[in-house]
Amino acid sequence: MFPAGVVLDRAGASNQYKAHGSEGRFPLREGSHMIFLIRLLQFVNMVLTAYMWIVIAAAVITWVSPDPRNPIVRFLYGVTEPVLWRIRRMIPTIFGGIDVAPMILIFAILFLQYVVIDGLINALVGAPPVMMR
């Protein structure tokens, strides 16, 4: 996740930051707030990945005739339908009987992960953006 050349010590601080005096009650390293933000962004990335797999499972389960009283089916629909409903309301997503709203949601999640979150992490670390070839 970190660019080449950035090494973390045992406390998780990057070697490019130097320690300084205490601020208030707790001594902070310069850049420790950046490490917190990076860890927070990594957590959001993991949550988005888990939600993407839930969306995929909900889309696959619609190919069969699921029992609507099944707790797994109710969970999948309860978690995904509010977001998919907003997408369907904004964009006509049914083409020839195929609902493309889950695909639009997956592309939006991938955009958030690879462009927004990775861009923020690279900006915090100070790495140049990675260009795809």
Image: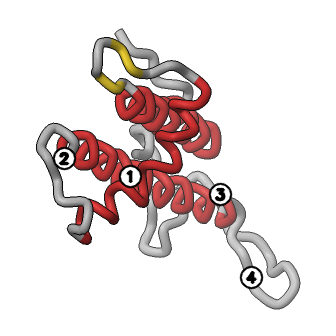
Amino acid type, residue under disc 2 in the picture: Ile
Residue position for label 2: 61
Closer to us: mark 2 or mark 1? Answer: 2
Q: Earlier in the sequence, mark 4 or mark 1?
A: 4
Residue 22: image quadrant is bottom right
Report helix, strand or loop for mark 1. helix
Indicate the position of residue 104 as horizontal and vertical percent values: 43, 27
**Residue 51, numbered label:** 1
Residue wearing tag 4: 27
Q: Residues within 10 Å of mark 1 (few under 14, many from 20)?
A: some
Quadrant where the N terminus sits is top left
Q: Measured from the top left, where is residue 39 in percent x and y? A: 52, 61
Mark 3 surroundings within 10 Å by alpha-carbon count, few (fewer than 14), some (14 through 19), many (20 or more): some
Alpha carbons under labels 2 and 4: distance apart:
52 Å
SS label for mark 2: helix
Name the image colouring: secondary structure
Distance CA(mark 2)–CA(mark 1): 15 Å
The first of marks 3 and 2 along the sequence is: 3
Q: Earlier in the sequence, mark 2 or mark 4?
A: 4
Q: Which residue lies at the image location 56% right of the left edge and 44% below the top edge? A: 121
Tell me which corner region of the image, top left, top right, bottom left or bottom right, holds residue 73. Answer: bottom left
Work out whether mark 3 precedes mark 4 in sequence or the reverse, and give the earlier one: 4
Which residue type carries mark 3? Answer: Met
First in sequence: mark 1 vs mark 3: 3
Q: In the displayed structure, does residue 80 sit left or right of residue 126?
A: left
Callout 1, which amino acid?
Answer: Tyr
Q: Which residue is mark 3?
A: 34
Q: For residue 36, say whether it is visible.
A: yes
Up-down relation of residue 26 to residue 30 (above or below):
below
Q: Where is residue 122 shown, x and y percent of the image?
A: 55, 38
- Other-residue count near label 2 (Cα within 10 Å), few / some / many at <14 / 14–19 / ≥20: some
